[in-house]
Amino acid sequence: MNPAPFRRRPLRTRLAVVTSTAVALVALGVLAAAYVVIRYEIRNQLDLQLKQQAGTLVQQARGSGTGVLYAECAWLAAPACAQVVPADPAAPGQRGLVLPVTGATRRVAAGTLGAHYSDIVRDGRSLRMLTTPLGHGRALQVAVRSDTVDKGVEQAGLLLGAVGGGGVLLAAGLGYAASRTALRPVSRLTATAERIAATRDPAHRIDLPPDGKRSQDEITRLATSFNTMLGELEDAVAAQRRLVADASHELRTPLTALRTNAELLARAERLTPAQRDRAAGALGRQLREVTGLVNDLIELARDEEPRQLVERVRLDALTERCVAAARGHWPATPFALETGEVADVTVPGVPARLARLLSNLLDNAAKFSPPGAAVEVRLDRRPDALDLTVRDHGPGISDEDLPHVFDRFYRSRQARALPGSGLGLAMARQIARAHGAELTAERPASGPGALFRLRFPDGE
């Protein structure tokens, strides 16, 4: 049988066929065993009857000569047909024997072969015959009709066959019902996946019972995990759409300004030297702004760090380099660094990406710090983590803005007048998560300002 067409059948059909076949084979095996046992017991009862008949006839046969013990034996009207057979084929009195005499019968009479049972046919009737030694060179043969026993065995076989046929049909029905019940969540999962493929809408879900009434079998767990995956996919698609919408919105203004200044410079002969200088300066600033925004978007599009670039990074040394660079970018803002007892502690990561994360935090703190107010950078070791905190003394984060600080393109009212695209903190959190760290924003325990906490798992 070619299994290829069977494999192309629906899973429900294959499961029903396999289940029904297994149940049917077990049922047929049990019925076959029952038939063998019934047949053995019925024939065993017949053999016991023959043995009892032979025991009753032994005394009578010992006092008689060779020949048939019952005159009606030919027609089996007697309880049993019995005859005495000598070991010598030439002995007198053997002309009227009605039961078949073979060489085995002579050996039983001679004592060289033990008693045995045999099936014979006489006058069209089935007989069961016992041949047993009688002593003095003779054997006793006793036979009883076995056609009624054979008929009973046949009827039992037919009955068991009918039961087996019904069992096979019942197994097929139960197998189909079991496959439908077991694969119902899979059918819903398939239908949901097909709807998503057709509509491209990941908002669909598989309908499942409430948590308290939900079973914990593997298929239900698969459906639950599929729903969770759909939720993550929906969030990812929504985030992608928001990113595209926000990026297009943020790019529209600088691109319009770029086009305006480019058109002005295209008519440079009509402008004064001062006007040309202003237009060229504005064009350069806007090009840098658009370039920075595009670079930030490219950075945000990365989901994880390339594994081949990951190495052990000394966090204290990296922090010192980033603070030194920030002092050059923000000469009017003092930076205070305190590393404590975290010297020589390393964490796994990509140095350039971690430097970008710290630079974004330092630039954000410096941007909101009042002139002359220090940005405090502190590196502490906790029992199970490393904490790097960056605190400024600016206006702080309002209750309204705190939940959205790390959203892409989100800018508070205080930040709208300051330079930037609103991607720096979103990029910092993404880099932190890619390195297994946690970045949070909070209010300082005392005084104004904002505090950003970068927590790494305990390093080495």
Image (spheres, grey):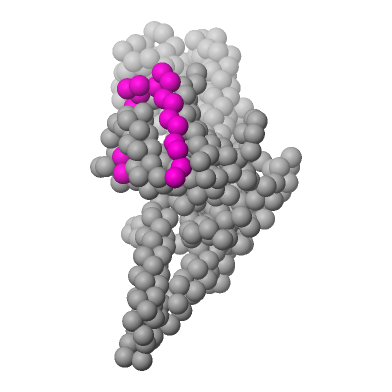
Left or right, 385 with respect to 79, comes to: left
Q: Is residue 145 above or below residue 252?
A: above
Farthest left residue? 308
Q: Is residue 368 above or below residue 459?
A: below
Q: At 43% from the left edge and 82% from the top edge, which residue is drawn?
A: 260
The x, y position of residue 67, in whole percent, is 46, 23
Residue 3 falls in which quadrant of the image?
A: bottom left
Q: Nearer the viewer, residue 58 or 333?
A: 333
Left or right, 57 with respect to 91, comes to: right
Residue 378 appears in the picture as rendered = yes
Residue 166 appears in the picture as rendered = no
Q: At 31% from the left edge and 44% from the top edge, which residue is drawn?
A: 352
The x, y position of residue 15, in whole percent, is 51, 52
Q: Is residue 417 above or below residue 448?
A: below
Q: Is residue 430 above or below residue 66?
A: below
Q: How many marks?
A: 0
Residue 393 falls in which quadrant of the image?
A: top right
Q: Nearer the viewer, residue 274 or 337?
A: 274
Q: At 53% from the left edge and 58% from the top edge, which residue is drawn?
A: 418
Q: Nearer the viewer, residue 368 or 275?
A: 275
Residue 319 falls in which quadrant of the image?
A: top left
Q: Nearer the viewer, residue 342 or 150?
A: 342
User: In what quadrant of the picture does the N terminus appear?
Assistant: bottom left
The x, y position of residue 294, in whole percent, is 39, 64
Q: At 66% from the left edge and 41% from the top edge, which residue is drawn?
A: 215
The x, y position of residue 194, in whole percent, is 53, 66
Left or right, 107 with respect to 402, comes to: left
Residue 244 lies in the magenta-colored region: no
Residue 336 lies in the magenta-colored region: yes
Please report the bounds of the magenta region as a residue range: 332-353
User: In what quadrant of the picture does the C terminus appear?
Assistant: top left
